[in-house]
Image (cartoon, rainbow, N blue to C red):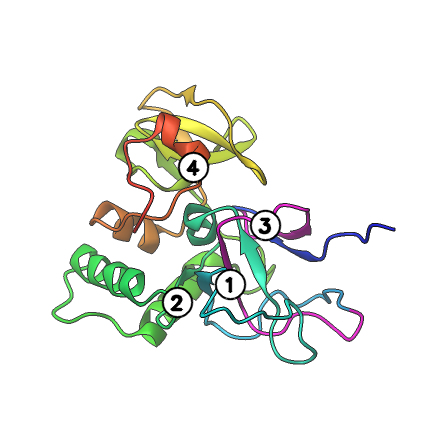
Amino acid sequence: MRTAPLQNRVTPTGEIVSDPGRGLLMGNRGCLHGPDRRLGVTRWRSKLWICCVLAWKGVRRDPMPPGRWTALFFLDEATALAAGHRPCAYCRRRDYVSFAEAWGRAHGLVRRPRAHEMDAWLHIERVDSRSRRQLTRPAVIGELPDGVMIRHGGAAGLLVGGRLLPWSFTGYAAPVEVPPTTTVELLTPPVTAATIAAGYRPLLHPSARAGSNLPRGG
């Protein structure tokens, strides 16, 4: 008998749902599940929302160890960043440093920001403290960098070269042309969008490469 997939797949809008897809990255926001391996109401336990590699030094990990942490899975890094996560400073050290340095350039900082400083800023921009829902903003598509996630016409997707690549748990669909003066809904936190504009390159799912000039790595 096939068991139902765990509720630990994350969408670009930050929702955590059940789906068989695993994606390229995992991450966590603390322990969100109970003894029955089901999620409760809480969607984070701390402001430290990270995205990590799937495999680390051959260690096999329970995705929902009791009382410890809940493994979350993302199609790719563009998805994780849109949901409000950042690269892990431990298992993705090089990407973390690249992200922090681009963050510093984007905001004119004299030193590289510390993890807790980025986490605090991200938390203000990613969720509404009262409704606990994702915060989004209107934006003109021609003013956004490649690599952010947007929603247009009811569809969420990756922005590449002024085109929308519709998102799904299995990958991106064929690109859709969107005029550069079009106002869309920006899903990626503005501070992260600025970091991408300053040179950070998120890890993308292979299905994005057909319509993308971005390298797959950060």
Above or below 125: residue 62: below
Above or below, comparing residue 150 to residue 48 in the picture: above
In which quadrant of the rendered view does residue 90 lie?
Answer: bottom left
**Horizontal and vertical percent position of residue 13:** 54, 47
Question: Which one is closest to the eye, mark 4 or mark 1?
Answer: 4
Query: So how many labels did they put on this image?
Result: 4
User: Pointer 2 and pointer 4: residues touching (CB < 8 Å)?
Assistant: no
Task: Say which residue label 3 marks.
Answer: 22
Residue 109, image quadrant:
bottom left
Give the mark nearer the N terminus: 4 vs 3. Answer: 3
Q: CA distance from mark 2 to mark 4?
A: 21 Å
- In reply to whether residue 34 is colored magenta, the answer given is yes
- Which residue is at the front of the view, 23 or 7? 23
The answer to which quarter of the image holds residue 184 is top left
**Residue 206 got which mark?**
4
Asked if the magenta segment contains residue 165, the reply would be: no
Which amino acid does the dot numbered 4 rest on?
A: Pro
Mark 4 or mark 1: name the one nearer the start of the chain. 1
Q: Amino acid at mark 1?
A: Gly
Rate crowding at label 1 as few (under 14), some (14 to 19) or many (20 or more) other CA atoms within 10 Å: many
At label 3, which amino acid type do we have?
Answer: Arg
Q: Nearer the viewer, residue 7 or 163?
A: 7
Amino acid tagged 2: Cys
Which SS class for mark 2? loop
* Residue behind mark 1: 27
**Left or right, 194 with reference to 111:** right
| SS assignment at label 4 | helix
In this rendering, the answer to whether 68 lies above or below 195 is: below
Q: Which residues are magenta?
A: 13-36
